[in-house]
Amino acid sequence: MLSEQVYGRLRGAIMRGSYAPGEALKPQDLAKEHGVSLAVVREALVRVVGEGLADRLPNRGFAVPAYSDRRWQEIAEARRTVEPVVLRLSIERGDVEWEARVRAAHHRLARTPAFGPDEGAYYSEEWSEAHRVFHRALLEGCGNPVLLDSFDRMWSASELARRWSAHRSPGRDHLVEHRRLEEAALARDPDAAAEALTRHLTLTAAGLSGETP
């Protein structure tokens, strides 16, 4: 239980930007801060490393990832390679319950404001969670927990980069992009769905890197 609590606090602090990119995560300091043993802290650190939210450096302990353009683009490339394939499997294997989850997740996302009054240029916490749930629901029909675990890890890593870098994109219509994804998936059109997802991920990567897709 202690490890779970420390993990939750540490993960939240990293995602909120309480630690700068590349900043060291010192087990001794964290143990003192949270009033727990080094063993508890190390267990929590191993979990955030597994999510891509921290790096384990040889002979140097742990640190928040120092995100370079190359690292972000590697994550984006992995997502564009893996997720459309998993979506095809999901469309092939998904049942009526899967369809219902996709429809409900899209409804929630469409009805959640992307920007709150206090969020400035950054996506609101509520929208970010609804966004994650929708994308995961699209893939859950694949029925393969190993593939879904891979999605979870890549999402966490890419969400961290988004929190650091994302800002309003005036020319982008997320509502249309997500509606196309939902419609293609529920129409059982794997080619259209995979194309829509690839385009969606390409626009996200371009927005964070400042490139033109």
Image (cartoon, rainbow, N blue to C red):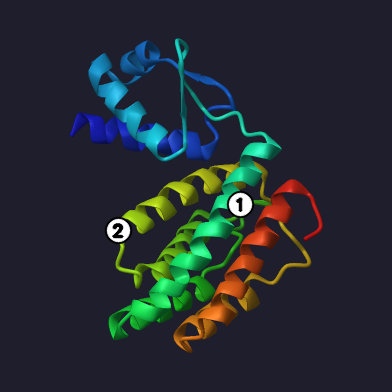
Instruction: Tell me: 93 left or right of 55.
Output: left
Q: Residue at x 73, y 55 (%)?
A: 206
**Towards the viewer: 73 or 22:** 73
Amino acid type at circle 1 is Glu
Res. 202 visible in picture: yes
Q: What residue type is labelled 2?
A: Pro
Q: Which dot marks residue 77?
A: 1
- State the image quarter where residue 113 is shown: bottom right
Q: How dense is the environment of label 2, judged by Cα within 10 Å: few (below 14), some, or many (20 and up)?
A: few
As drawn, the residue found furthest toward the bottom would be 187
Q: Where is residue 94 in the image (x, y as percent from the top left)?
A: 34, 79
Q: Where is residue 186 in the image (x, y as percent from the top left)?
A: 45, 85
Where 29 sits versus 130, above or below? above
Q: Of 27 and 59, which appears nearest the observer?
A: 59
Give the left or right position of residue 207, taking residue 163 as reference.
right
What SS does tag 2 mark?
helix
| Screen quadrant of the C terminus | bottom right
Which of the two labelled residues, at mark 1 and mark 2, occupies the earlier sequence position? 1
Q: What is the quadrant of the N terminus in the image?
A: top left
Identify the disc placed on residue 166. Answer: none
**Could you tell me residue 10's position as x and y percent?**
39, 31
State the SS at label 1: helix
Q: Residues within 10 Å of mark 1 (few under 14, many from 20)?
A: some
Kindly tell me whether residue 105 is visible in this rendering: no
The residue under label 2 is: 145
Q: How many labels does the image show?
A: 2
**Left or right, residue 148 beside residue 210:** left
Residue 114 falls in which quadrant of the image?
Answer: bottom right
- Residue depicted at x 50% and y 54%: 125
Q: Which residue is drawn at 58% across and 81% down?
A: 192
> Outermost residue toward the left?
1
